[in-house]
Image: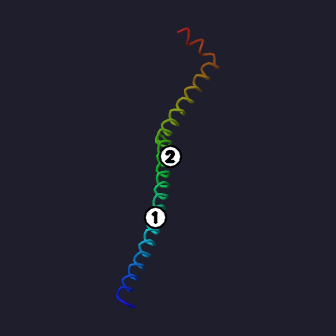
């Protein structure tokens, strides 16, 4: 093989390598875009979860106040059922 033949062989192999590299890079780019879309969806879902659970710390306060409200309602019920409400109204 002459030196010109070797040059053509080297150029041909270089072209094949360039085409294969381009195809592989394109496949890689498509996978990166797919991962990026999925990460965006995970981020959006995470923000929704955070928004839905941002006030859960209030549940303890709500439970305490509900207990106080139930106690007060029971006192009212006892007062009204014992007949002392009429006596209290006369004072």
Q: Residue 9's quadrant in the figure?
A: bottom left
Secondary element under disc 2, as helix, strand or loop, is helix
- Where 86 sits versus 74, above or below? above
Do tag 1 and tag 2 residues touch (Cβ < 8 Å)?
A: no
Query: Which residue is located at x 36 percent, y 85 percent?
Result: 4
Q: CA distance from mark 1 to mark 2?
A: 35 Å
Q: List x then y, in percent, for residue 7.
A: 36, 83
Determine the residue positioned at 50% across, 39% down: 59
On screen, residue 35 versus residue 14, left or right, reads right
Question: Residue placed farthest to the top in the image?
Answer: 90
Compared to residue 3, the image places residue 66 above or below, namely: above
Q: Report the front residue among 74 and 10.
A: 10
Tell me the crowding category of disc 2: few under 14, some 14 to 19, or many 20 or more residues within 10 angstroms, Cα based.
few
Task: Please count the marks in the image.
Answer: 2
Q: Earlier in the sequence, mark 1 or mark 2?
A: 1
**Pointer 2 residue:** 49
Q: Which residue is mark 1?
A: 26
Instruction: Locate residue 14 relative to residue 60 in the image: left or right.
Output: left
Q: Residue furthest right?
A: 81
Of badges 1 and 2, the one in the foreground is 1
């Amino acid at each position: 093989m002459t030196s010109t033949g070797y040059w053509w062989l080297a150029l041909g192999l270089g072209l094949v390598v360039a085409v294969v590299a381009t195809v592989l890079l394109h496949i890689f780019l498509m996978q990166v875009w797919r991962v990026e879309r999925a990460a965006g969806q995970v981020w959006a879902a995470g923000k929704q979860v955070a928004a839905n659970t941002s006030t859960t710390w209030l549940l303890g306060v709500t439970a305490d106040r509900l207990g106080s409200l139930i106690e007060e309602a029971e006192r009212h019920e006892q007062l009204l059922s014992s007949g002392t409400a009429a006596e209290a109204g006369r004072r």
